[in-house]
């Protein structure tokens, strides 16, 4: 893997739902936090990344989960509300605007605006502009699944065509520059070595190229069945395990033909969601990326 992925300001983690995308975002954030100040940003309203860190729910706030690692579950509406507060600064006027049906319909329904808010928040966090935000060097964004992840990255272009002035227009231009710069924004795709997730990952790569002129920096193949060893040939459980492993190997070959970018492989682990799982995955990912021992 090109080491420049670890020099990015924003790393967007996406992939089909159910492939372990959030676990990979937490793992990548933990690995980066060995050397940098990191914010893992979650946008799923179900809020489950905190479980992986053994931390309390974020509920929109910044939660410290390590010496250089923070987590936040973001409610996109918070971003534009804060912009209004910063620009108007008059409490009564701010209150009137935030309660206005026109403002609420605009921020809640305009195409691409919610995705734009997520990326705008990441940019503001990097610049230390978000209220109560810790100082961070990189944001790891646990992005929506596959096609929605592409829509998120394309949002600055969509919104920029409609809103060109005012605080939202200014933020949109800055975010568009951030996302378009391959030296500042990296893209990591997570998949399983199974037919449907692998096919979706290959299609995602093509969508990123067609819509954004971008290619992913890294493919992570998650939850691989280790080779079965020491089991009798007629053991039903061992037969099933070997069958799953053969399926994995077939899909790894297919991914290898379709995906020239760097790839990392992580094993299926008999662990519940939590700190031990992330610690094991971090060690495995560090080894896969050739990063050596933790500092």
Image: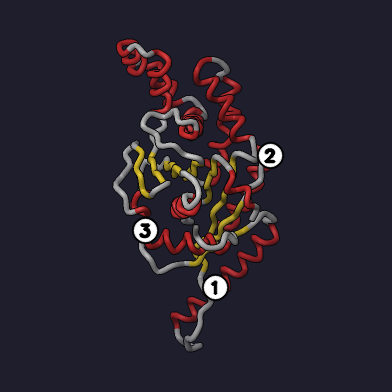
Can residue 143 be seen here?
A: no
Q: Are marks 1 and 2 in contact (CB under 8 Å)?
A: no
Left or right relative to 144: residue 64:
left
Tell me which numbered mark, 1 or 3, is placed earlier along the sequence: 1
Q: Position of residue 175 (x, y in %)?
A: 56, 30
Above or below, 241 relative to 266: below
Give me the residue at 67% from left, 54% from top: 261
Tell me which numbered mark, 2 or 3, is placed earlier along the sequence: 2
Q: CA distance from mark 1 to mark 3?
A: 27 Å
Give me the residue at 42% from left, 59% from top: 278
Which disc number belongs to residue 275? Answer: 3
Can residue 98 be seen here?
A: yes
Q: Crowdedness of circle 3 by 10 Å Cα count: few (<14), some, many (20+)?
A: some
Q: Position of residue 130 (x, y in %)?
A: 42, 29
* Residue where numbered disc 1 is placed: 245
Q: Provide the secondary structure element on which disc 2 rests.
A: loop
Foreground residue among 25 and 209: 25
| Front disc: 2 or 3 | 3
Q: Quadrant of residue 46?
A: top left
Q: CA distance from mark 1 to mark 2?
A: 35 Å
Q: Are marks 2 and 3 in contact (CB under 8 Å)?
A: no
Which disc number belongs to residue 213? Answer: 2
Tell me which numbered mark, 1 or 2, is placed earlier along the sequence: 2
């Amino acid at each position: 893997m090109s080491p420049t992925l670890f020099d990015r300001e924003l790393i967007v983690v996406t992939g089909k739902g159910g492939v372990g995308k959030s676990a990979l975002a937490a793992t990548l954030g933990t690995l980066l936090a060995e050397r940098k100040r990191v914010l893992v940003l979650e946008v799923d309203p179900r809020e489950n990344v905190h479980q992986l860190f053994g931390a309390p729910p974020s509920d929109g706030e910044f939660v410290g989960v390590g010496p250089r690692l923070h987590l936040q579950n973001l409610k996109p509406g918070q971003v534009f509300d804060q912009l209004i507060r910063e620009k108007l600064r008059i409490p009564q006027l701010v209150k009137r605007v935030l309660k206005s049906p026109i403002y609420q319909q605009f921020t809640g329904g305009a195409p691409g605006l919610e995705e734009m808010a997520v990326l705008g928040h990441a940019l503001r966090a990097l610049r230390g502009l978000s209220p109560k935000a810790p100082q961070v060097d990189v944001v790891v964004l646990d992005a929506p699944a596959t096609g929605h992840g592409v829509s998120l990255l394309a949002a600055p272009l969509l919104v920029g065509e409609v809103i060109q002035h005012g605080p939202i227009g200014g933020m949109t231009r800055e975010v568009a520059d951030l996302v378009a710069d391959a030296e500042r924004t990296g893209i990591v795709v997570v998949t399983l070595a199974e037919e449907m997730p692998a096919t979706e990952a290959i299609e995602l790569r093509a969508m990123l190229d067609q819509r954004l002129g971008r290619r992913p920096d890294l493919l992570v193949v998650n939850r691989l069945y280790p080779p079965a060893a020491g089991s009798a040939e007629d053991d039903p459980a061992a037969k099933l395990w070997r069958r799953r492993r053969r399926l994995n190997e077939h899909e790894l070959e297919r991914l290898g033909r379709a995906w020239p970018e760097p790839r990392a492989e992580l094993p299926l682990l008999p662990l519940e969601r939590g700190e031990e799982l992330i610690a094991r995955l971090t060690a495995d990912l560090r080894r896969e990326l050739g990063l050596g021992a933790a500092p």
